[in-house]
Image (cartoon, rainbow, N blue to C red):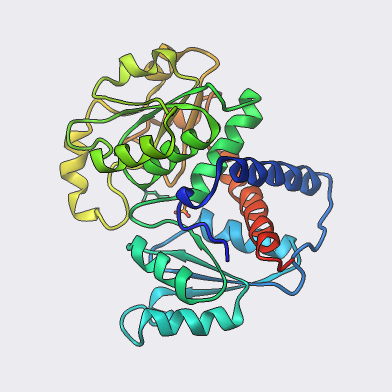
């Protein structure tokens, strides 16, 4: 049974396949085609944290593919201790072709993958956001032709999004620089694992965003305080001062740079209004591409598991 609990679950050739399928499904959708590749399939989403893009992109995607979606909050599913995770997994696995989870704990996602008997997709945990990073690779391919050899500069917290971006760069042959204040870099443990998995990955860290973006093909940011870190919001806002993406920073990289953000954005904090709405911003294309990627990923997983 194949899953996407993190981008460590896929080979680089498989990442390429999923991206190609997503591009293809997007072209089909844009030409008005709604082939029901997933007729009769059921996806069940269990989310412990809020979501706009992820939840709706999977629901819209499965609907376009002819399947059905069910949504449960973590509390509805009983993740608050009503029964064991193993029991919940087995029950949901009996009804579902794919279980999609948004959680705090990465371990919870891995347990459901082990126990449910059906494909599991990580829709964001404290550690990873693989669907977002795959979508970002797709969006870069659309704009720059290919992602291989491109330089991404992520300015912000070394969080779930940054880690998944590092892994997608490893898979696709892009280079990543993380520009963050001291204390917010990717951990040595994660970097060592990423470097071991992708020996050719160029992964640098700096506290100088202006220097880092000079050679950027894409500049990326995310919120400074992720879901679950709300109590640190003010402390982080103070520590990240000087790391906002504004048009001055985009100008250092030039006219052709892409500005990317996974959203939701805190306008005025990690990104200025002007940068959000700048012609170099591709953030709303990223948001739409979440659906095309979700479709490609679901179809790929169902095919791998000989289900579709
Ligand atoms: N980018 C993203 O995952 O957005 P949501 O939190 O709204 O799903
Ligand atoms: N790092 C953010 C991403 C939101 C899509 C969070 O975890 O809240």
Q: Is residue 5 above or below residue 15?
A: below
Q: Residue 99 in the image: x percent, y percent? A: 54, 70
Q: Is residue 82 visible?
A: yes
Instruction: Name the foreground residue: 298 vs 76.
Output: 298
Q: Quadrant of residue 66?
A: bottom right
Residue at figure coordinates x 62%, y 64% from the top left: 59
Q: Is residue 115 above or below residue 82?
A: above
Q: Quadrant of residue 63?
A: bottom right
How many labels sit on residues?
0
Quadrant where the image shows the C terminus: bottom right
Q: Quadrant of residue 209?
A: top left
Q: Residue 32 in the image: x percent, y percent? A: 84, 50
Q: Is residue 45 above or below residue 269?
A: below
Q: Residue 197 in the image: x percent, y percent? A: 42, 40
Q: Is residue 267 visible?
A: no
Residue at figure coordinates x 77%, y 49% from the top left: 29
Residue at figure coordinates x 26%, y 43% from the top left: 189
Q: Is residue 105 left or right of residue 303?
A: left
Quadrant where the image shows the N terminus: bottom right
Residue at figure coordinates x 38%, y 16% from the top left: 248
Instruction: Name the foreground residue: 286 vs 81.
Output: 81
Q: Is residue 239 left or right of residue 247?
A: left
Instruction: Name the foreground residue: 108 vs 132.
Output: 108
Q: Residue 153 in the image: x percent, y percent? A: 40, 26
């Amino acid at each position: 049974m194949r899953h996407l609990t993190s981008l460590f679950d896929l080979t680089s050739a498989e990442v390429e396949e999923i991206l190609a399928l997503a591009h293809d499904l997007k072209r089909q959708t844009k030409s008005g085609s709604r082939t029901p590749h997933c007729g009769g399939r059921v996806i069940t989403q269990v989310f412990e944290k809020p979501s706009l893009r992820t939840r709706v992109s999977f629901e819209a995607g499965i609907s376009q593919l002819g399947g059905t979606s069910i949504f449960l909050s973590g509390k509805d599913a009983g993740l608050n201790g009503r029964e064991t995770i193993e029991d919940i997994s087995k029950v949901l696995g009996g009804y579902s072709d794919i279980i999609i989870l948004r959680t705090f704990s990465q371990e919870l996602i891995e347990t459901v993958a082990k126990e449910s008997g059906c494909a599991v997709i990580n829709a964001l945990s404290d550690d990873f956001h693989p669907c977002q990073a795959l979508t970002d690779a797709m969006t870069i391919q659309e704009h720059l032709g290919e992602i291989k050899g491109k330089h991404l500069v992520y300015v912000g917290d070394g969080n779930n999004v940054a880690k998944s971006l590092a892994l997608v760069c490893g898979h696709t042959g892009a280079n990543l620089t993380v520009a963050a204040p001291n204390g917010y870099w990717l951990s040595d443990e994660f970097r060592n694992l990423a470097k071991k998995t992708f020996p050719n990955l160029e992964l640098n860290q700096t506290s100088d965003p202006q220097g880092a973006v000079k050679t950027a093909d894409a500049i990326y940011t995310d919120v400074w305080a992720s879901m679950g870190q709300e109590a640190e919001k003010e402390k982080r806002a103070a520590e990240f001062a000087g790391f906002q993406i504004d048009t001055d920073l985009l100008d250092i990289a030039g006219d052709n740079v892409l500005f990317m953000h996974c959203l939701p954005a805190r306008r005025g904090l990690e990104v200025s209004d002007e940068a959000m709405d700048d012609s170099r911003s591709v953030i709303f294309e990223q948001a739409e591409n979440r659906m095309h990627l979700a479709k490609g990923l679901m179809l790929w997983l169902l095919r791998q598991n000989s289900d579709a």
